[in-house]
């Protein structure tokens, strides 16, 4: 299974295995990753699944839909590499993905 690594604002590193077809958010919730609350359950309506994607991975991810961009505008400290983890579907191509959890969440 693809491995996804989460780094929180205290530099605590958690690497989990996530089944293909689940989202990065779903993997985080199932593995009790702190800071990914996913209040809206993946509906692109809360931004509590906000993560910063490591630069080297940005181009390998699907482009953002309008709704994701709009929601990220309301997130805590959005950056150019911000994503909603509920919109990132895990596949073999994402094996090794590294994301950082914003300080307000993690
Ligand atoms: Fe709410 Fe991703 S879980 S926007």
Image (tube, grey):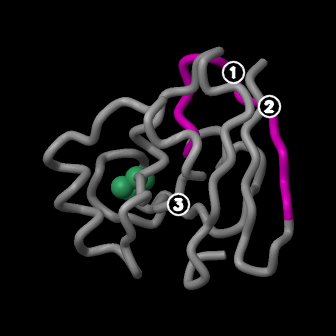
Q: Residues within 10 Å of mark 2 (few under 14, many from 20)?
A: some
Which is more toward the observer, 43 or 54?
A: 54
From this viewpoint, is residue 40 visible?
Answer: no
Q: Which mark is residue 17?
A: 2
- What residue is rendered at 52% in x and 60% in y? 51
Where does label 1 land, which residue?
Answer: 19
- What residue is rendered at 61% in x and 26% in y? 94
Which is more toward the observer, 40 or 90?
A: 90
Which is more toward the observer, 62 or 58?
A: 58
Of label 2 and label 3, which has the lower sequence position?
Answer: 2
Do labels 2 and 1 touch, CB within 8 Å? yes
Range of magenta residues: 13-25
* Ligand 1 location (quadrant): bottom left
User: Which of the two marks, 2 or 3, is nearer to us in this view?
Assistant: 3
Q: What is the secondary structure assignment of the residue under circle 2?
A: strand
| Residue 104 placement: quadrant | bottom right
Left or right of 32 in this view: 37? left
């Amino acid at each position: 299974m693809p491995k996804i690594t989460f780094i929180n604002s205290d530099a605590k590193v958690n690497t989990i295995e996530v089944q293909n077809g689940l989202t990065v958010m779903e993997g985080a919730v199932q593995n009790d990753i702190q800071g990914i609350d996913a209040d809206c359950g993946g509906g692109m309506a809360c931004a509590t699944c906000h993560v910063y994607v490591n630069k080297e991975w940005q181009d390998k991810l699907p482009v953002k839909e309008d709704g994701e961009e709009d929601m990220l505008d309301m997130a805590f400290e959005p950056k150019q590499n911000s994503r909603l983890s509920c919109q990132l579907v895990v596949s073999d191509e994402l094996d090794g993905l590294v994301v950082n959890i914003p300080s307000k969440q993690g």
